[in-house]
Image (tube, rainbow, N blue to C red):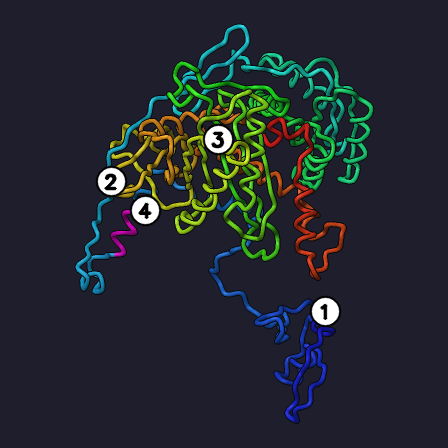
Amino acid sequence: MSSFTRFPLQLESGQTVECTVAKYFNERYHIKLQFPHLPCLQVGQEQKHTYLPLEVCNVVHGQRCIKKLTDNQTSTMIKATARSAPDREKEINNLVMKANFNSDPYLQEFGITVSNQMVDIQGRILPVPRLQYGGRTRAQVIPNQGVWDMRGKQLYQGIQIRIWAIACFAQQRNVGEDQLRSFTQQLQKISTDAGMPIMGQPCFCKYAMEADQVEPMFRYLKNTYQGLQLIVVVLPGKTPVYAEVKRVGDIMFGLATQCVQSKNVIKTSPQTISNLCLKINVKLGGINSILLPSIRPPVFGEPVIFMGADVTHPPAGDRSKPSIAAVVGSMDAHPSRYCATVRVQTHRQEVITDLSLMVKELLIQFYRATRFKPTRIIFYRDGVSEGQFAPVLSNELRAIREACMKLELDYQPGISFIMVQKRHHTRLFCTDRKDQMGKSGNIPAGTTVDVGITHPTEFDFYLCSHAGIQGTSRPSHYHVLWDDNHFSADELQMLTYQLCHTYVRCTRSVSIPSPAYYAHLVAFRARYHLVEKEHESGEGSQYSGNSDERNLAAMARAVSVHPDTFRVMYFA
């Protein structure tokens, strides 16, 4: 507060006295503060003690907010900036015309001219993979424009759920017992149709309010109901209860949890419940669908492990929170099941520091699951900018090799190291309007480009594997930085496109391969596991001596999942 905040003021005589901000502004600028009870802004260098009362400051109009936006702000921003592909194309052309680059004296001096027309390039649409479902019909599906549905089909390997519970953290006046009963009936009907029957009534159904009730409730459930398979948790929108549910379920007790928003319980829709079933099935070790074995690329002829890796960093403006590295690996031949490893590392460190151990863990787990040693490792690495390709490749490729040699000295599977980039400014538009898809007028799912706008000597390509629903589709950019397996461009593009169809959470082809997407989900989940653990380890958060290391050790424990959780796709 201005009336209490003191700082050392040097008088003309050279003497230094303590002075309040309110008194200083009154004596120096003859400004009597109207709101001396409000806090001050500290500006400039910390040691200089420069404080400004809020009422004398103005925020300059039109500045970009670099802090993390709230969910509502993000949603509003996307709606305001989303443009259909034809509109975006017009906008870009208008900007180029306005910029009038060719009359720029500096460009003229260097003899550079810029075309006012977008470059025309040849693209191809890759063939769509077939997917296999289970049940009696063993139905096959051919996606249409990156989308298919599950009506009349059953999960490839559905789990039967016999012992399950419901915990409702929404108030009883908002979600009544009748609504919970109706939701339960709908869930049971749709799950049975999908080949993942949820049998009988829940063994436990109680209301609760606060996050601190989660741990005792889950402990009671674990101890009382042997073989408890699932806890369905009803939440009243955005709440700290979610992070606590995931921490207690994933880390402490190894219990599968499925959260559902109260609005989706009050007003059920078959689509929402069907999506819940997709998530529940894989959390319990089931398989939703697989790529039809007969159409898979030749690489599947021998044991192969697909890995995805990502590092998520704290939001802009944060100077202390750690970065989180996640690596996932496929655990079967389809590939459909994945295992995850996660580590906490230094703030904004992009290279995965503990990659060797993480890969070793996944290779051991792959062997336990399949009884095979992979002869190939296909490694999709997300979240790296071009400027960091060299250090990431040299460190991480060596770490993968090291992991293999730690298992057996002469174990040297072929490694393909592929960077996946979504943050770039390349946009592709259809030259022929007849090729535009849907309301947004985007390029068709499966469009790939590997000429004209790619690197002249390196192995890279653009692939738009998803159907754009809103705005302009952003094709993913793939750079093959290392390839012991000698993939042709066609083989790797097909393989990547097929992996985009194996994502378990929806019946759509997604924008990046499933292993890379899962790594992102794992790192994102670990942020929830760390809530209230960051710099509050319980071992003292003072930065003296080796407290940084103690902090990292405490955080590493906070993201280590329970052995029962490790074996399933808890992050789905």
Q: Residues within 10 Å of mark 4 (few under 14, many from 20)?
A: few
Q: Earlier in the sequence, mark 2 or mark 3?
A: 3
How far apart, in angstroms, are the residues tagged by discs 2 and 1? 63 Å
Residue 13 in percent (x, y) is at: 66, 94
The residue singled out by tag 2 in the image is 452
Of mark 2 and mark 1, the one earlier in the sequence is: 1
Between circles 2 and 3, the one closer to the viewer is 3
Q: Residue under label 1, please give it.
A: 37
Residue 9: say if magenta. no
Disc 1 on helix, strand or loop? loop
Q: Position of residue 72 (x, y in %)?
A: 57, 44
Q: Which segment is the magenta one?
A: 91-99
Q: Nearer the viewer, residue 162 or 276?
A: 162
* Mark 3 or mark 1, earlier in chain: 1
Q: Which residue has dot 3 on it?
A: 411
Nearer to us of marks 3 and 1 is: 3
Q: Amino acid at mark 2?
A: Gly
